[in-house]
């Protein structure tokens, strides 16, 4: 079976710890079929090929079969669609695969990718809420920020500047970064979307806990925010960034694709 050029396959035989480490590093990276860049897998978006030759978003990278990887950049994707680059790149990536002759993708692929990334983030926030890692309510967020218990501070896209500044200042105190200008992340979701995702009314700000320096929850949420923000071309701010070396940082962890 041929392997598409953007997919890495580790050797079936691993002779040494060095070889195992090399194979692990190789498996954690993928090549963008549009730019040719090799980047950490969790910073890219996967496109999956259905049995009937339809290309569909697979943000959790869990769909079976072959996949093609692209950078989360809507402008670049729309340009590649307009000039035919995406079609050619997909044909090369899935050469010899099922449905290759009739390979196609929906006209609204960028919109579908956006919706999938938004869903990935909201589902991740819901999972972290149920795990007890989400702090809600401005007063609670401010209190826990000042005592260093908030690893990731998030603001809705339609939050007020005054409300953000107050919590940002408390967060800098708790992280001992006063004077740095660091601020929480303004994410590409408004208060209505956050309220629905978390089952609460008027969610404008939220914090992700970082008890005893445990940044795993912040990494998981940060990864989902980073991909969505990169796709829409927004600046989330200077809050905690996900560690690509964290095996739990994948935005798709514990979320099943449908």
Image (spheres, grey):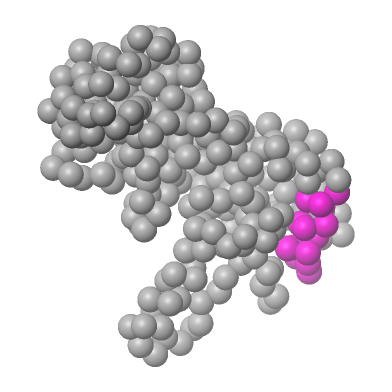
Q: Is residue 217 visible in this depiction of the protein?
A: yes
Query: Residue visible at 72% across and 48% down?
Result: 55
- Magenta segment: does it hold 96? yes
Question: Which residue is nearer to you in this view: 169 or 256?
Answer: 169
Query: Residue visible at 55% across and 74% down?
Result: 9
Q: Is residue 58 visible in this depiction of the protein?
A: no
The answer to which quarter of the image holds residue 150 is top left
Q: Main secondary structure of the magenta part?
A: helix
Q: Position of residue 222 (x, y in %)?
A: 39, 39
Q: Compared with residue 246, is residue 123 higher up or lower down, i.e. above or below? A: above
Q: Compared with residue 112, is residue 83 higher up or lower down, i.e. above or below? A: below
The answer to which quarter of the image holds residue 102 is bottom right
Q: Compared with residue 138, is residue 118 higher up or lower down, i.e. above or below? A: below
* Quarter occupied by the N terminus: bottom right
Question: Which residue is nearer to you in this view: 43 or 61?
Answer: 43
Horizontal placement of 32 versus 208: left or right?
right
Q: Residue furthest front?
A: 179
Query: Residue visible at 71% across and 43% down?
Result: 76
Q: Position of residue 19 (x, y in %)?
A: 41, 83
Q: Position of residue 50 (x, y in %)?
A: 70, 52
Horizontal placement of 55 versus 168: left or right?
right
Q: Compared with residue 198, is residue 27 higher up or lower down, i.e. above or below? A: below
Q: Position of residue 253 (x, y in %)?
A: 40, 47
Question: How many numbered discs?
Answer: 0
Question: Which residue is nearer to you in this view: 110 or 101?
Answer: 110
Q: Residue furthest bottom?
A: 15
Query: Residue visible at 47% across and 39% down?
Result: 226
The answer to which quarter of the image holds residue 106 is top right
Magenta stretch? 84-98
* Quarter occupied by the C terminus: top right
């Amino acid at each position: 079976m041929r392997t598409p050029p953007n997919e890495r396959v580790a050797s079936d035989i691993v002779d040494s710890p060095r070889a195992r480490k090399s194979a692990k590093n190789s498996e954690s990276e993928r090549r963008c079929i549009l730019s040719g860049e090799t980047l950490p897998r969790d910073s890219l978006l996967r496109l999956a090929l259905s049995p009937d030759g339809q290309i569909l978003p697979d943000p959790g990278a869990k769909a079976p079969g072959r996949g093609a990887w692209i950078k989360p950049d809507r402008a670049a994707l729309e340009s590649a669609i307009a000039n035919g680059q995406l079609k050619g790149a997909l044909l090369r990536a899935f050469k010899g695969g099922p449905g290759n002759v009739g390979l196609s993708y929906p006209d609204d692929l960028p919109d579908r990718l956006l919706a999938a990334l938004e869903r990935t983030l909201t589902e991740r926030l819901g999972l972290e809420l149920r795990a007890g890692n989400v702090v809600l309510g401005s007063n609670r967020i401010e209190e826990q920020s000042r005592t260093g218990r908030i690893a990731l501070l998030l603001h809705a896209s339609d939050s007020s500047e005054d409300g953000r500044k107050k919590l940002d200042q408390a967060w800098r105190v708790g992280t001992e970064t006063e004077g740095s200008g660091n601020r929480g992340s303004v994410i590409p979701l408004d208060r209505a979307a956050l309220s629905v995702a978390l089952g609460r009314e008027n969610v404008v700000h939220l914090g992700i806990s970082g008890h005893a320096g445990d940044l795993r929850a912040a990494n998981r949420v940060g990864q989902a925010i980073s991909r969505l923000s990169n796709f829409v071309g927004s600046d989330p701010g200077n809050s905690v960034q996900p560690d690509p070396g964290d095996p739990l940082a994948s935005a798709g962890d514990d979320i099943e694709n449908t």
